[in-house]
């Protein structure tokens, strides 16, 4: 009798939700919110003479962001994260015995890697603070006849790319590791 083994792959990806999709379901524009967040954070950085750009959550707690603007960003961010999670589940569930979402985080609420004197800092910040990009950490389980099949990480990477690339404006798989 053939024995089946559960193999687990840890996959990290970053996806950008299409603006048309967000605009169809939300009253606020993600781009407008991203620009307004950037402007207010730039003002805070200038006022406090910071040598870095903080995460939006931190800037909000310091009083550097209007409460209504932060609420709009959080609403868009929550909706984008939910949409991404549902799309990944729908498109990839048939290929894996289990998809376990370790984390689903909207990138706009993380600290940007942009520095104040960097070329194109403003446009990079607007891109970062626009709440349409989501980072996912997923553990995908698959049943295989071999205990540690060769090329499993590459297979999972290709499967994710093939099934999700049409769903999002941008998709980057930053990690695929067999556990």
Image: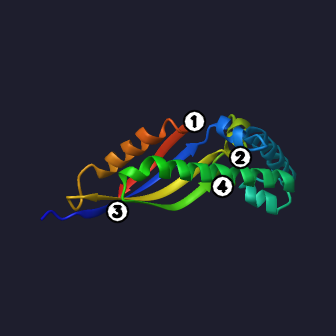
Residue 132 position, x and y percent, is 66, 44
Please rate how many residues cluster around mark 4, counting C-alpha atoms within 10 Å: few if below 14, some from 14 to 19, many from 20: some
Please rate how many residues cluster around mark 2, counting C-alpha atoms within 10 Å: few if below 14, some from 14 to 19, many from 20: many
Residue 68 position, x and y percent, is 85, 53
Quadrant of image for the N terminus: bottom left
Distance from the alpha carbon under mark 3 to that under mark 1: 29 Å
Quadrant of image for the C terminus: bottom left
Which residue does the numbered mark 4 point to in the structure image? 110
- Residue 108 in view (yes/no): no
Name the disc covering residue 179, or none: 3
Q: Relative to 74, is 122 above or below?
A: above
Q: Are marks 3 and 1 in contact (CB under 8 Å)?
A: no
Q: Report the number of numbered marks.
A: 4
Distance from the alpha carbon under mark 2 to that under mark 3: 33 Å
Left or right of residue 48: residue 158: left
Name the disc covering residue 62, or none: none
Which residue does the numbered mark 1 point to in the structure image? 169
- Circle 1 SS class: loop
Q: Are marks 3 and 4 in contact (CB under 8 Å)?
A: no
Of tags 3 and 4, the one toward the viewer is 3
Distance from the alpha carbon under mark 1 to that under mark 2: 16 Å
- Circle 4 SS class: loop
Distance from the alpha carbon under mark 4 to that under mark 2: 9 Å
Left or right of residue 167: residue 75: right
Which residue does the numbered mark 2 point to in the structure image? 129
- Circle 2 SS class: helix
> Quick one: label 3 or label 4, which is nearer the N terminus?
4
- Circle 3 SS class: loop
Left or right of residue 57: residue 149: left
């Amino acid at each position: 009798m053939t024995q089946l083994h559960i193999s687990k792959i840890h996959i990290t990806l970053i996806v950008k939700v299409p603006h048309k999709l967000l605009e169809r379901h939300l009253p606020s524009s993600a781009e407008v919110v991203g620009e307004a967040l950037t402007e207010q954070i730039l003002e805070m950085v200038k006022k406090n003479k910071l040598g870095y750009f903080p995460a939006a959550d931190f800037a909000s707690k310091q009083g550097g962001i209007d409460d209504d603007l932060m609420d709009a960003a959080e609403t868009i961010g929550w909706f984008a994260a939910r949409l991404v999670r549902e799309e990944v589940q729908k498109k990839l569930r048939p290929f894996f015995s289990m998809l376990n979402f370790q984390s689903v985080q909207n990138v706009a609420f993380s600290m940007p890697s942009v520095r104040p004197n960097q070329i194109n800092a403003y446009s990079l910040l607007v891109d970062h603070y626009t709440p349409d990009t989501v980072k996912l950490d997923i553990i995908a389980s698959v049943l295989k006849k071999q205990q540690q099949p060769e090329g499993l990480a590459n297979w999972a990477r290709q499967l994710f790319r093939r099934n999700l690339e049409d769903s999002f404006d941008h998709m980057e798989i930053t990690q695929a590791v067999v556990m």
